[in-house]
Amino acid sequence: MINKLVEKIKKTNAPIVVGLDPMLSYVPEHIQKAAFAEFGETPAGAAEAIFQFNKAIVDATYDLIPAVKPQIAMYEQFGVEGVKAFQKTVDYCHEKDLVVIGDVKRGDIGSTSAAYATGHLGKVQIGSKSFSTFSEDFATVNPYLGTDGIKPFVDVCKEEKKGIFILVKTSNPSSGEFQDREIDGKPLYQLVGEKVAEWGADCMGDSYSYVGAVVGATYPEQGKLLRKVMPKSFILVPGYGAQGGKGADLVHFFNEDGLGAIINSSRGIIAAYKQEKYQNQGITPENFADASRMAVVDMIEDIASALK
């Protein structure tokens, strides 16, 4: 799957991923009203509204982008109905031939870690049959339980030719409370980056490993260091746009081949219709998906300009 991601980035010239992280407050009123008319003001109604919102954004952008990243918490808050909407979103994105990065941030050990890996990336055995369930192409994983928590995911990645992105240096302001702590003269995030490179060394696609890393756009200097530490790992970079990251901050996340990183924007794209910039171009809540397409084009241009 890392090979497919690289191929689609080359084809689209867009090293970006759209974060499908919908809060109900992002969903225009006319979509909510239609969903509530059918299912009531219930978790099922909220889930339907979110799926229809996602579907419209995917329809407006799929030809421009290689990948999407649904954040499962935004769906789980609505319980079982929300999880169904997550699954419908994953399936619909696959119908559009998009690579799906499940932002699930799983982290456990032993049989529990293996079950997470099976559920999100592998196949579960039921009697004489096996089934892919959530069936994302990549999943995000928390490494802080050590190799015991990562190995089951790596094993499934090898078997299914899928991938993971391991949290290394996250974009949030307090990430340094732990991740920047020095151990034997190195910050913890660097030690984790070294383990990512080690875990991925025997789990390679054509040019990049199935084992990637998450490094926030808000920490470009750390990204520069980690790019050297993990030369064969793709870096998933959150924090662009709404969290303050800009194209000019991102140059050092990429390798000299122009690859090696994929930049995420979530509400900067899916809630673009709320921005004055796009409202001034005729965007209303009724044509919200057009604003998402405009925001994708602007992001592609920003990153391309920075990489020149």
Image: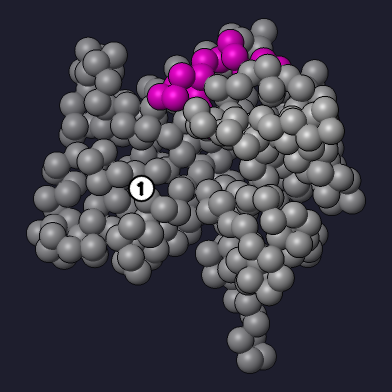
72 left or right, relative to 5: left
From this view, report whether residue 177 is shown above or below residue 281.
below
Q: Which residue is painted at 58% across and 63% down in the image?
A: 120
Q: How many marks?
A: 1
Q: Secondary structure at mark 1?
A: helix
State which region is magenta: 231-252
From this view, report whether residue 237 is shown above or below residue 208.
above
Snapshot colouring? one colour
Q: Which residue is painted at 48% across and 59% down in the image?
A: 91
**Would you identify the image quadrant in which residue 208 lies?**
top right
Q: Is residue 25 visible?
A: yes
236 in the magenta segment: yes
State the image coordinates of residue 61 (x, y, percent, origin top left): 43, 34
64 left or right, relative to 251: left
The residue wearing badge 1 is: 55
Q: Is residue 214 visible?
A: no
State the image coordinates of residue 140 (x, y, percent, origin top left): 60, 49
Say few, some or many: other residues with alpha carbon within 10 Å of mark 1 (under 14 / 14 to 19 / 20 or more): some
Q: Amino acid at mark 1?
A: Lys
